[in-house]
Each structure stands twice: as structure tokens, then as C-alpha cells.
Image (spheres, grey):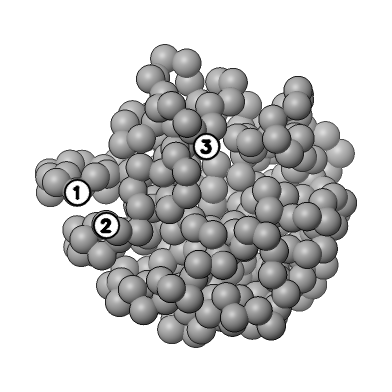
Amino acid sequence: MSYTRVFTGPKPKLQLPKGACDTHIHFYDDRYQTLPNTPTPPAVGVAEYRQVMDWLGIGRVIVVQANAYGDDNRLVMDSTAALGHDKARAVVVVKPGVTDAELDRLTKAGARGLRVMNLLGGTLKLDVAEEMAARIKPYNWSMLLQLNGRELPEHEAMIKRLPVRIIIDHVGKFIDPVPVDHPSFRCLLRLIDTGNVWVKLAGWYETSLNGKPNYEDVGALARALVKHAPERMIWATNFPHAQADKFGYPDESQLLDLLLDWAPNEADRKKIFVDNPSELYGF
């Protein structure tokens, strides 16, 4: 599917509070070697994303290591530096055996999280989650987990053992979406109730079978999550929508406005957009 990226447009109805944080974006640059079997969209960088920040009213951002670059964190860290320490933090990928000196260097440069991707193309899988959690704990990093949410029950005990803050990606990424009374979704709620697990409201268009404009199958889960624990939710654009060749390039403004329905309470939205990411990423 061919597509055109759009970086600006009509303002969303939802006016973001000051300091709102987009907690998941990627950058791509042809100067860096990519790995096979990973999404590798055309190059896009800080200049384009700054237009999206202006468009939506985003004040802060978390740059997440793209699967395409494995554990080569140069692009993610260079982009974080370009955006500025007052506005940006990074989530990186480091492998078992990484030195303390490298973890310290990355922390000083703005890294605040480790990405574990238990799906095709991920560099770190759940089999190293406990080992890596022990390594990042002294640096106060969180761990970002992306997996098929239907598999959560089989990993529940391990996730509860992890000694760092955990962020479950993409509204749980249930492939395919489940009803709110499904055992795997109930498992996600139990994990949230530990007080150590957050959920990212992002990328729902990748799993929704209902599709736009409302993505109601995943929207029902998002609505239930916000109602259950707004203090454990964060939000992201998922810019630049690395799998847009499969799903089409979404309208950033329309995606954001879904939060008016999913999180209708303004105080809850301030938690989701400002307070919760500030706590997780040290703004």
C-alpha cells in the first residue's frame, strides 16, 4: 500500500495540556544499517516530527529504538540530543553483556528505558527480560514490553517478578482484539493492579479489526483500561507509523481525538499526557 506522510493539518479538538508527552516515536535514517525482517520505512527525522509537535501541541517526547536498528542506538540517541534534554528521553536496546560504563553513558545522554520486543523483528525477547531488568534497575530505567497480549497469562508470573517499572505497549497488543471479560485482558488488569505496570495507549490501528474511524474493538479495551487505572496509562502517536504500508497512514489529529471518548475526564487526561510520563521518564 502506497502512502504519503502528513505532518500538519487541522488542529485536533482535544487541546493537550502543557507538557504533554508523546511516549513512543521512531526515526529512520538511510545512513544507518538496518536489519532484515524488520519494518524499514523511508527516512524521517527530527525536523518532520517537530511539525507534528506543533500540530498537536506536544511538549515532550520519548524516542524509542526502532527494531530496524537492533542494538545500534546511535540514531535514537542523536535524535534525543537534537530534540533537547528538556523535551526528550530515549528508550534503547542493549544486549546481555552490555557494560556498566555503556549503561551509565546512555543514562547521562537521556536513556530511561529498555525495549523488549517479543514479536518478529525484536532484538530482545522475554527470555532475557529478568536478566536485563536486573542490569537496568540501578539506572532507574523502565522496561517497555511488546508482545501479543493474548499470551500475557503465560508470562504473568515472570512479569510480576521483574524489579523495574513495566510498560505494556499498544493497548496490550491483543492479536486479535479480545472482549473486556477475556482471561488475557483480565490478566492485564491484574498486572496493572500490582502498581508496577503501565499501559501505553498507542498503535491500536495495527490490531483493530473494526478499523477507522473509531477502532471500536480496541477502543473498548482502551476505555476499560482508563476507567480501571488512569494513573497507569500513557499515550503515544507511534509516529511515523512504521507499518503504514500495511495499514495506511493515519491522521494524527483524528487518532488523538479518540482520547476525548476513551478518557472523557480532563483530570484523567492530565495524568495520561503529563503526570504519568513525567514520573516514568524523569521530566
Q: Tell me which label, 1 or 2, sits earlier in the chain.
A: 1
Secondary-structure class at tag 1? loop
Q: Circles 3 and 2: CB distance less than 8 Å?
A: no
Which image quarter is the N terminus in? top right
Residue that sits furthest to the top in the current view: 31
Of residue 32 and residue 109, the one placed in the foreground of this image is 32
Task: Write the residue at 31% across / 31% down.
Answer: 72
Of residue 180 and residue 271, the one placed in the foreground of this image is 180
Secondary-structure class at tag 2? helix
Q: Is residue 272 visible?
A: yes
Q: Quadrant of residue 249?
A: top right
Q: Is residue 13 above or below residue 156?
A: above
Q: Circles 1 and 2: CB distance less than 8 Å?
A: yes
Task: Write the residue at 24% across / 45% down.
Answer: 95
Please give left or right for residue 106 compared with residue 33 in the image. Answer: left
Please give left or right for residue 267 compared with residue 10 in the image. Answer: left
